[in-house]
Image (cartoon, grey):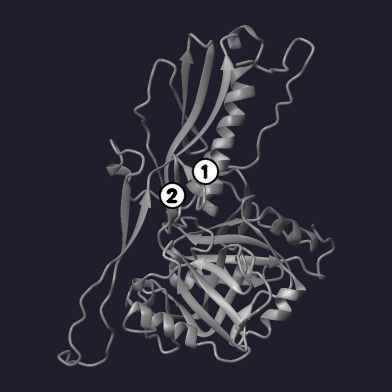
Amino acid sequence: MANDFKTSRKTELVALRAAEAAGYLTVGSAKYFKDQLKGKRNGTTFEFVIPDVGTFARGIDISAGGTPDLKEKKVAKQILAENVKVGTNILEKVTDVNWDKEVAKPNGKLLINGTVKDAIDGVKGQTIDGVTVTDYDGDWGDTNTAFAGIGYGPLTAAQNYLASVSDEAQYAFINPLINAKLSETGDSFKPSSADPIFSKGLLGKLGETEYRSCQFMPLVSVSTALATAMATVDGIAYVDNGDKTATITLSASGTAIAQKIPKGFVIWINGLYATDLVGMRTSALKAFVAVEDGANNGEMIVKALTAEDLIGRGNKLLCKADGSALGTSKSAAETALAGMVSAVGDVKFLEAGNWFGGQIRVDGAYEFEMLDEIDASNADTERADNEGVIVFQNRAIDVLKGSNVTRWSALVMAGIVEPRCVATVLVRDADTNKVHLV
């Protein structure tokens, strides 16, 4: 193993601090299992319970209609291991390399960035510890509503909607180019302060909602051809893929539209409404957000709906205009969902253009925990709390080969546990702005 360090008395280190922060994970997140994580290991699964409710009725006599049983919804999250590793030779200490600045800090930041990106995008399709992940586990698409438009409109609409669902504080994480587009019109977020550990990426406030920049929020490009094809959609099919995703096939006159659906694309179905925290109808339509690129024409890959999402009472995510569930079984509800699209205009969609994405969520709708100790400790183990993320640095030494392997590790449990308190926002790069960002 040979080092290729460039530092010497004739060189100078370019020491720039990385901009991305862990605010997406640490700000506005809950620690539901804080007292239960000690001694747990990678892979341990925890279940979050979404409570059910009874039925509302007016009158004194409750004998008619029977008494409904409570059926809790469970959302499972695992402790996952994240790591970055580098190799050096045993001459590392006799060079003039600044280990902390040149090696530890950039790799610790890479670990944080990778953890944030994995949380948003998920790791479906990646091979981890020799096993290919088959289930979708990302946050993008794990939302009940989406608001799209120009300028501040989508942001204020999402904020007001979430305020009608929960009175908890709100936090927003947006593609940084949203702020750029707003600034072009002379607008800006109101300056605000935060604890230094939570201040990274803080843009300011809009109303009472704190906004932070997050580089891993997607850009969604909708072509004119796709928008034109969407305008002809008069039917859909919904199929659960068995990997926590579902395929919605968009068709016109019984044939799938001749366009592929990109990740981030959003549709809404007339008459299909999002619900609040007790399963009652809200004024917003349920949003379906593509979590990955469609493989075939007309196929939109979304996060799958569970039985509780579809047919529950207090824990359902969507309902008909009268507030009732779509069906009495998961299969019946899926059939009813597809049956709600029978004519052109029943599906609303993103129009052509570039859309910068973001997420607004209510305090406590997100879970973020970390293990604060590991089993692989030795004399060279160091522990640091970096922007709210606990990072371990371990070094393994092979004396015979004359090599060192240094690893930075984090054991994380993160993810949305209550999508009814999460809204997606999409701001379009519109002609009303001065500059188009490409």
For image coordinates 52% across by 11% down, the residue present is 401
First in sequence: mark 2 vs mark 1: 1
The amino acid sitting under disc 1 is: Thr
Question: Which quarter of the rendering shows the N terminus?
Answer: top right
Residue 282's spot in the image, x, y percent? 46, 80
Query: Residue 173 sits in which quadrant?
Result: bottom right
Which residue is outermost to the top? 94
* Label 2 close to label 1 by CB (< 8 Å): yes
**Location of the C terminus (image quadrant):** bottom right
Report whether 16 appears left or right of 238.
right
Residue at which label 2 appears: 414
x 58%, y 30%: residue? 107
Instruction: Please tell me whether residue 372 is drawn above or below residue 359 in the rendered image.
Output: above
Residue 45 spot, x, y in % from top left: 32, 49
In what element is the residue under mark 2?
strand
Categorize mark 1 by other alpha carbons within 10 Å: few (<14), some (14-19), many (20+). Answer: many
Report the residue marked by disc 1. 115
Residue 200 in the figure: left or right of residue 30: right
Query: Which mark, residue 203?
Result: none
Q: Residue furthest right?
A: 434
**Numbered disc total:** 2
Residue 193 visible here = yes
The 10 Å Cα crowd at callout 2, few under 14, some 14 to 19, many 20 or more, is many
Residue lying furthest left? 63
Answer above or below: position of 39 versus 320: above
Q: Nearer the viewer, residue 322 or 257?
A: 257
Amino acid type, label 2? Ala
Indicate the secondary structure of the residue bearing disc 1: helix
Across and down, in percent, residue 336 comes to: 43, 86
Q: Is residue 119 above or below residue 64?
A: above
Splitting the image into 4 quarters, where does residue 108 fall?
top right
- Is residue 319 at least partly visible in the picture? no
